[in-house]
Amino acid sequence: MEAGPYDFYRVKLSNSLREKSSAVRLDFNSASSNGYRDNTGYGQQKLTLRVDSNRQEWINSSVISGSLLNQETGAYVEGENAYSDPSLKRSNPSPEAYRDAWSSRIHTRFTKKSKHSELTLTPYWRRSQMNFLMHFLPGTPAESNEQTSAGLQANFSWNVSKHTFFSGLRMEGAEIELQQNQVSPEVFGKLPQGKQYDFDVDTRYFSTYIGADWLIGDKIHLLNSVRFESLYYDYENNMLSGNTREDGSQCNSVDGCRYTRPASSNDTFSDGAVRLGFSYDFNDRSQFFASIGSGFRAPQATDLYRLQAGQENADIDSEKISSFELGLNRYGHRYHSQITAYSQKKKNVIYRNSDRYVFNDGATKSEGIELALNIELNIDQQLSFAGSYARHQYENTWGYEVATGDDMDTAPRKLAQISWLYQPSFLLNGKTSWVLDASHTSRYFMEPTNTVFYPGHTLFNARVSYALSSVIELSSRMINISNKVYAERADYAFGSERYFPGAPRSLFFAFEWQF
């Protein structure tokens, strides 16, 4: 159990039973809070049941899970440095905003192992539903969506001499429904009252891959893999096509209604990707690795069928990415480190320009270096660090907003986190644990033209726990120790700076009892 400020409460319950070759575990998690900001309370519950069994040749693991969320949504606060304004940072400009959602999932993993191979089959079923108020849009329409999907994932690996081969496939069918409805009167002569979108999409997905890990001598690994994917959309528009009101009449604006509904259609996207990798073991403590590869992302249904400004056909294709990375792993007596440098380029990037048209000709590049380090300072103390420095840039001009070489908006160049763990063996018989961590986000541009930026922030957090007995533990944690005024997110839209203010210093207490 855990409690904290703003009426925060969390309860976690878990129970398990093991008998011979079978085991059952039930987990429940419930959390609620009134929120730091006005009208930002929420309640969330999660339930998971897992059953494991080992029956002769097959190992089986089945999971049934569900979640429920009822949330009062906090909107952006707007204006220059609004996140630091005492009169604004706790306010909620859209107190009527909400998000109600639930989801459920069932999957069963069947695994069969032999001396030189392993086969895994995982059939699954998923369903989710969400209703929320789109407070960030003029007219504040409400969206309701639901998805139902079922599929099968299969993976097979086998060894031949010193080499390992692997292959697999995934098949899935899904049904998606979406509606967008505006209760308020027409806004700006172009955002009509009533239904704005109402469509169904049936999808059929198939992917397969094959690869190998070749061991050459005792020090060299060569890795290669090939992947193919096909995604089919069967889209049905349940309203009149075009950018009219629900009843077919024209909006008062000379440009017509903003939201455009394309006619029913079918779309298929087929893509392939490859990866080549190499690693070399200098010794049992040092390893060099490098890889080159490609990837893709097929358009989402909302990219294709949620159009605006009279655009009747998105005419877009899958995004493509190519990447290269190299790095070094080091394993010392009391430390492990990994340093990685990478370069990525994307093309066919999907975006919506200032005229509200969807395009598919964007290009970006990202280049950076990452470091992860874990050090055992002594028998009582450990230090861990993870950080990155990267530059994310636009590679071409996107309409009127983006120029070649500009930094991508909301993409900080520097991210870092450091954590110190102290478990003093001399204090209370070694039953206490102390953790102090710091996280840093550097400044970033809030919009594509790189004229407005958020300065970044550094936050400090701490946690202490005490094992009262073998089954009872008391703990406390404090977030934002320095009471830093910061924004969880900052961007720029509709001619104004927008922020999600971060929470101030907060203290939480928890009690854990195992029985």
Image: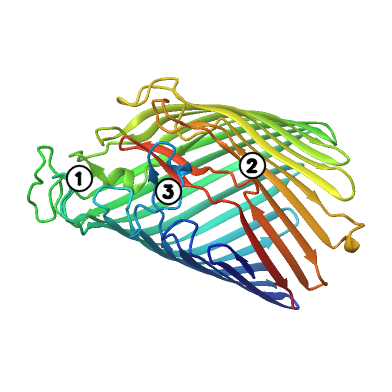
- Rendered residue at 40%/36% (across/down): 80
Give the secondary structure at mark 1. strand
Considering depth in this image, is 501 or 429 the residue closer to the camera?
A: 501
Disc 3, disc 1: CB below 8 Å?
no
Residue 455 lies left or right of residue 280; in this view the side is left
Q: Which mark, by number, is residue 102?
A: none
Distance in Å between CA atoms under marks 1 and 2? 43 Å
Q: Label 1 is placed on what type of residue? A: Thr
- Circle 2 residues within 10 Å: few <14, some 14–19, many ≥20: some
Q: Point out the frontmost of discs 3 and 1.
A: 3
Q: In the picture, residue 258 is in which quadrant?
A: top left
Distance in Å between CA atoms under marks 3 and 1? 39 Å
Q: Label 3 is placed on what type of residue? A: Ser
Label 1 belongs to which residue?
Answer: 260
Label 3 belongs to which residue?
Answer: 87
Residue 494 lies left or right of residue 331; in this view the side is left
Give the secondary structure at mark 2. strand
Considering depth in this image, is 400 or 300 the residue closer to the camera?
A: 400
Question: Does 398 sit above or below residue 153?
Answer: above
Q: Which percent across, then down, holds residue 257?
A: 15, 44
Q: Which percent across, then down, holds residue 354?
A: 28, 32
